[in-house]
Amino acid sequence: MITLDELLARYDSATGVRLERWIFRGLVRPERAGEPPRFADIDVARVELLVELGEVLACDDETLESVMELLDQVHGLRRRLALVAQAVGRQPESVQKAIAAELHRLDEETREGD
């Protein structure tokens, strides 16, 4: 975990202003337990991604917010899918085979519809 000052020291002053807006908008969520606020590794990575998208791709804050919402959804779906796979893996082999067969059937149906 790093402090806000440590995080700001990595970037120029313009990024510092944007960082405060990103925090206000909830794109970056520091731990509020203590003062000064501290940032976990995931938040530092989010700031780095936001800076890169903002500078390299010239994304405005609204676009950044949309991109981050989509990324959060993808990560949430991946986590949920991993849980589904774990749940299926705990089922008897006959159930696992039935699920695999149904997935295959649904996949074929979907390909035919394309």
Image: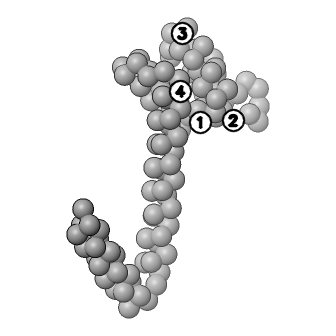
* Residue in the picture at 31% in, 82% down: 101
Determine whether the residue tagged by mark 4 lies in a helix, strand or loop.
helix
Q: Are marks 1 and 2 in contact (CB under 8 Å)?
A: yes
Please name the residue that numbered disc 4 is placed on. Answer: 62
Q: Earlier in the sequence, mark 3 or mark 1?
A: 3
**Front label number (4 vs 2):** 4
* Residue in the picture at 67% in, 26% down: 24
Please name the residue that numbered disc 1 is placed on. Answer: 40
Q: Earlier in the sequence, mark 3 or mark 4?
A: 3
Residue 47 seen in the figure: no
Is 28 placed left or right of 70 in the picture? Answer: right
Determine whether the residue tagged by mark 2 lies in a helix, strand or loop.
loop
Give the residue type that dot 2 points to: Glu
**Front label number (2 vs 3):** 3
In the image, which disc is placed on residue 31?
Answer: 2
Where residue 7 appears, as percent x and y from the top left, is 57, 21
Q: Are marks 4 and 1 in contact (CB under 8 Å)?
A: no
Q: Earlier in the sequence, mark 4 or mark 1?
A: 1
**Front residue of 32 and 63:** 63
